[in-house]
Image (spheres, rainbow, N blue to C red):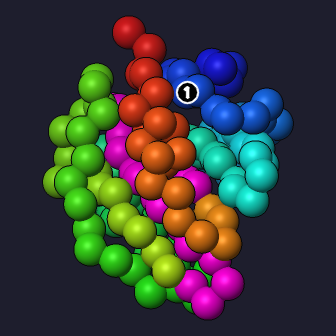
Amino acid sequence: MHPADAGIGAMFPCKPAVNSRPATAAEPAAMGLAECKADQWTFSLAWADLADPALVGPALSQMPRSLAGKLNAQPGAVEPLAVPGMTPNPAAQMQRLSGDKQKARVAVFARGLRVYQVLMLGVQDNPAAWDSFLTSLKLDS
């Protein structure tokens, strides 16, 4: 699927609901989320447009930390991430998060001023589903 104005396509294992919000004076970043549940896992792709290139690296670094806090999860080792067509950034990464009740895998990267977060969340880890979801990402030309 290619969510409108996301600049990326992904193969979800289920039909995602898509929500987006344009930039406004009160919320200067346009944002979007595509999300669905398959069996016991939630798969999501989120994106946001930033106004300043200096904000991209800090945003990429903060997204997994914020998610870990929301899940009360311990972060695993940070792994480098390369999505074809992404803007190289040392803050682009993949990480596993392990909470008391949920396990998550999260990847963050950017293309220009747009930041992306890819997430798989469930009661247990599913490496095969994660690899399939992550490798399906295709940034628009």
How packed is label 1: few (under 14 Cα within 10 Å), some, or many (20 or more)?
many
Residue 75 belongs to magenta span: no
Is residue 22 rendered to the left or right of residue 53? right
State the count of labels: 1
Q: Position of residue 74 (x, y in %)?
A: 44, 86
Q: Position of residue 108 (x, y in %)?
A: 40, 51
Which residue is more in the foreground, 38 or 25? 38
For the stretch drawn in magenta, the main secondary structure is strand
Q: Position of residue 70 (x, y in %)?
A: 63, 80
Which residue is more in the foreground, 58 or 35? 35
Q: What residue type is labelled 1?
A: Ala
Q: Residue at horizontal 30%, vertical 56%?
A: 93
Residue 111 belongs to magenta span: yes
Q: Specify whether residue 21 is in view.
A: no
Q: Residue at horizontal 75%, vertical 59%?
A: 40
Question: In the rendered view, would you say 131 is above or below 94?
Answer: above
Q: Look at mark 1 in the image and give the residue it sits on.
A: 10
Q: Tell which residue pokes out farthest to the top in this image.
A: 141
Mark 1 residue element: loop
Q: Specify whether residue 36 is in view.
A: yes
* Magenta part of the chain: 99-120
Question: In the rendered view, would you say 140 is above or below 125?
Answer: above
Is residue 58 rendered to the left or right of residue 47? left
Which residue is more in the foreground, 57 or 135? 135
Question: In the rendered view, would you say 95 is above or below 93?
Answer: below
Q: Where is residue 66 in the image (x, y as percent from the top left)?
A: 52, 75
